[in-house]
Amino acid sequence: MMAGIDLVHVPYRSSGPALTDLLGGQVQVNFAGTTESVEYIRAGKLRALAVTTAKRLEALPDIPAVGEFVPGYEAAGWYGLGVPKNTPAEIINKLNEAMNAALADPKAKARLAELGVEARPMTPAEFAKFIADETDKWAKVIKVAGITPE
């Protein structure tokens, strides 16, 4: 949408078959997650054109970020920890502290970076804002693209 590029979406059930078809030449481009594609890129089996994160990845420093030529572009997958709505604040804070400590561990941080994953420790309030911002961003894309539930 931001670059004015018209691509044909080919739906896949998972990244495995999509990467197989990309490697086999059945599709010409794929927005693959770094964790499943980084080794193919390093081995020279895939040519990475860009990463969709806000900035270049430590794992692939020579690969530009799309935002370098499409200002403001960022489309990164993310994971978070959720709990039931009525979970007491002290339990949420304890889980948050433990998760952030694990993400700060040098060994874990290095392994994640090797896979092209950038750990972003947050407070529960920061994570709630992040989810709200992502929801707003993708709602705009859905509206402009005219996407509707099947």
Image (cartoon, grey):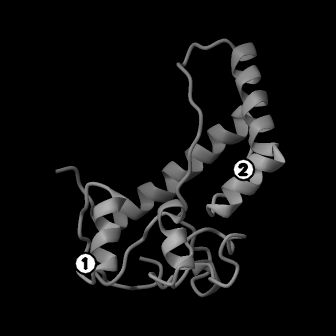
| Name of the residue lying farthest toward the left | 150
Closer-to-camera residue (93/28): 28
Cα separation between marks 1 and 2: 32 Å
Left or right relative to 22: residue 135: right
Picture mark count: 2
| Horizontal arrangement in the rendering, residue 71 relative to residue 147 (left or right) | right
Answer with left or right where residue 142 lies relative to residue 21.
Answer: right
Residue depicted at x 51% and y 82%:
48
- Residue type marked 2: Arg
Q: Residue at x 64, y 58 (%)?
A: 117
Q: Is 138 or 108 nearer to us in this picture? A: 108
- Dot 1 crowding, Cα within 10 Å, few <14, some 14–19, many 20+: few
- Res. 8 mark: 1
Residue 120: mark in rendering = 2
Q: Earlier in the sequence, mark 1 or mark 2?
A: 1
Q: Where is residue 119 in the image (x, y as percent from the top left)?
A: 70, 51
x, y (%) of residue 38? Answer: 54, 69
Residue drawn at 56 percent across, 51 percent down? 78
Locate residue 99, reporting x and y percent: 72, 33
Residue 57 horizontal/vertical position (percent): 68, 71
**Disc 1 residue type (three-letter):** Val
Please state, as top left, top right, bottom left or bottom right, where the N terminus lies in the image: bottom left
Q: Give the residue at x 62% y 83%.
A: 63
Residue 103 tag number: none
The one nearer the camera, 105 or 89, is: 105
Q: Quadrant of residue 79?
A: top right
Q: Is mark 2 on a helix, strand or loop?
A: loop
